[in-house]
Amino acid sequence: MTRRTTIVEVAELAGVSISSVSRVLNGIPARKGTEEKVRSAAAQLGYTPDATGRALKLGSSLQVAFAVDDIGNPVYTEMMQGVEEGMSGSGARLVVASTGHDKHDLLSLVQSLSRGYADALVISPLQRTPELVQALLDAPVPVVVIGDLGPDVPLDVVRTDSRRGVVLAHEHLVASGRRRIAFVNGPTDTSPGRARLEGFQTAVATSGAAGPVIQASGFTVTAGEEAWAQLEALGPRHRPDAVLAANDLLALGVMRAALNAGRRLPRQLGVVGIDDIQFARIFSPSLTSVSLQARERGRLAAELLLERIATPGTPARTRFVAPELVVRESSRSATDAALGQSS
Amino acid sequence: MTRRTTIVEVAELAGVSISSVSRVLNGIPARKGTEEKVRSAAAQLGYTPDATGRALKLGSSLQVAFAVDDIGNPVYTEMMQGVEEGMSGSGARLVVASTGHDKHDLLSLVQSLSRGYADALVISPLQRTPELVQALLDAPVPVVVIGDLGPDVPLDVVRTDSRRGVVLAHEHLVASGRRRIAFVNGPTDTSPGRARLEGFQTAVATSGAAGPVIQASGFTVTAGEEAWAQLEALGPRHRPDAVLAANDLLALGVMRAALNAGRRLPRQLGVVGIDDIQFARIFSPSLTSVSLQARERGRLAAELLLERIATPGTPARTRFVAPELVVRESSRSATDAALGQSS
DNA sequence: TTGTAGGCGTTATCAT
DNA sequence: ATGATAACGCCTACAA
């Protein structure tokens, strides 16, 4: 750790004014000798301009913030990679802020981030509170929301239809001969939790292949394992022949626990997840999942952001991404295999 | 997106001076009427102090940066969670900067991040270049490195011994009766790549159970799948009876590809990874892995950081974390099962 | 081409 | 208790 070096010291060492230093370092032409002196002095002192002073003066930080509730979920990592991809070449750096397991406020995060540290904000909140929406509207920088924001909020949004995603999954399970389909949901005080439950109810109302509904303690693998324990406790006569999980981590947890309990997958138990994270394909049996196109959503968000920066003042827009069922091994029944069904 | 509100406007609306606004908002006692006026004006305008101006004045951003090459690798997410855990209660926010797949410079990232946007830096670099080391030494904020930094660099470091980790894995495979052990490494122009290769060579020199060495194109699942293809191409007579992979993503890729090719795991092929990411336990067969304690290393890094901030000027310290073999299904042979071997 | 000076938004010192 | 004012480090008219 070295002392802070400022432009003044560089100027003194080089024997020129601070303006000359600033100019040279920003690529504005100067006399050759001056340029030389400045560069050598800067190098000697290991000088890098202070980002704070620069941002204060310029009113821009060259940073875009990506804020999520739990970067521990791979789906958000993929989304982030999409954002990164969409922003590449824009000259801005992406910084990620996650509330992680500590339930810090996404709210205060948004506020301070958008007041200085970032020129724009991409956020994918699990919970949509009125305060959060207000903070987003009050933010002095462009904001793009990935997720459900409710109607008539004048903000750029990238959304998908996870209700429909659940229905797709359910229809698929029914079509592969499953009759007693349990739904393992995450917390219903979240937007995805509510939407996916609605989707399940809709699907059941149509086809009737209902099973127990479990609300797990989170959207995590561990929560999925616990959920299976509850299902197992129902006893052999009431156990489901398929599980529809509200996301892939839950699905993976259910599969692991069911495997541990000696169940045969997919013969005795079909499993379908949602999100289609990259591990879904890798797992054995590979996990059937409904892709909500996280990466593409991230990419679209970045696109909206760049367009808004280029032409501010345009009305808020919504980009829609359709869910897509990806059939893999975890949901094949004997019947499926015979039919050679694929996505 | 709303216009920027400054302290001046709040002061005007409240009918007080900017000093009073600043004081009230920073919790310094004021007359009740003043406090009231300021708070109501601030609320009405939705005012949040500008982080840039504040950081410039205070010389501190209340942010700690965590920089890694690829946040897409779950091991870094876990490390990040450790850092977060270790910092909780410090009042600082953690921001993550990842170069992702774009090979932006970790170097320039370090420089600008440490010059204003962060009060401290935790970094876990894949490659250790002289320039990076110099930039780290020149950083005007405390820096903690997780990884290998070479000898005699006066920086706080959290390290582990991944050579030893590889040796542990190899010994385990030999002990479970594997004779032809392939090594699937990541790029050797990285510190982990080099260290793990050395570990493998050491282990082979001791026990002799050598197999082909493959250098995959990255530390990723896909690279692991490709690596298995190469192994498969060797033909039945030269195929290994075990794979030691340089990290878990490679190992998972190898397993997936081998399963696709119809291999029986672990009977025909034992697999061991390194890192012990959370998915290692979940996968089926569950993956034997050497834990490098990513989370704990993150926690220790945060600890070092907080101590250095509390008492600057103390000599650089190194924290060491020992690798630990975690035996699971992927490496059990018939013999193992009979012996009831566990970790 | 170069230097002087002002100001970005904030906090803190110093009068009042 | 409150207000005027000087920094923090930088960039950029504007003047020389």
Image (spheres, coloured by chain):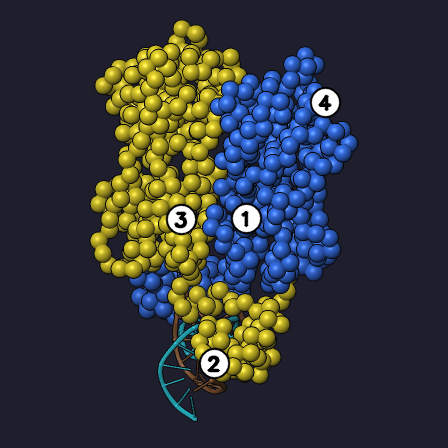
Chain colours: A yellow, B blue, C brown, D cyan
Q: Which mark is residue A85?
A: 3
Q: Which residue is mark 4?
A: B175
Q: Is residue B219 left or right of residue A181?
A: right
Alpha carbons under labels 1 and 2: distance apart: 37 Å
Q: Which residue is mark 2?
A: A30
Q: Quadrant of the C terminus of chain A?
A: top left
Q: Residues within 10 Å of mark 2 (few under 14, many from 20)?
A: few
Considering the numbered disc 4 on the image, is that residue within a helix, a strand or a loop?
A: helix
**Marks 3 and 4 close (CB-CB < 8 Å):** no
Q: Do badges 1 and 3 share one subunit?
A: no
> Which of label 1 and label 2 is nearer to you?
2
Residue drawn at x 60%, y 36% as measured from the top left: B214
Q: Do badges 3 and 4 share one subunit?
A: no
Alpha carbons under labels 4 and 1: distance apart: 35 Å
Which chain letter matches label 3?
A: A
Q: Do badges 2 and 3 share one subunit?
A: yes
Residue drawn at x 34%, y 42% as measured from the top left: A297
Q: What is the quadrant of residue B200 in the picture? A: top right
Alpha carbons under labels 2 and 4: distance apart: 69 Å
Considering the numbered disc 2 on the image, is that residue within a helix, a strand or a loop?
A: loop
Q: Which mark is residue B68?
A: 1
Q: Amino acid at mark 1?
A: Val
Considering the numbered disc 3 on the image, is that residue within a helix, a strand or a loop?
A: helix
Which chain letter matches label 4?
A: B
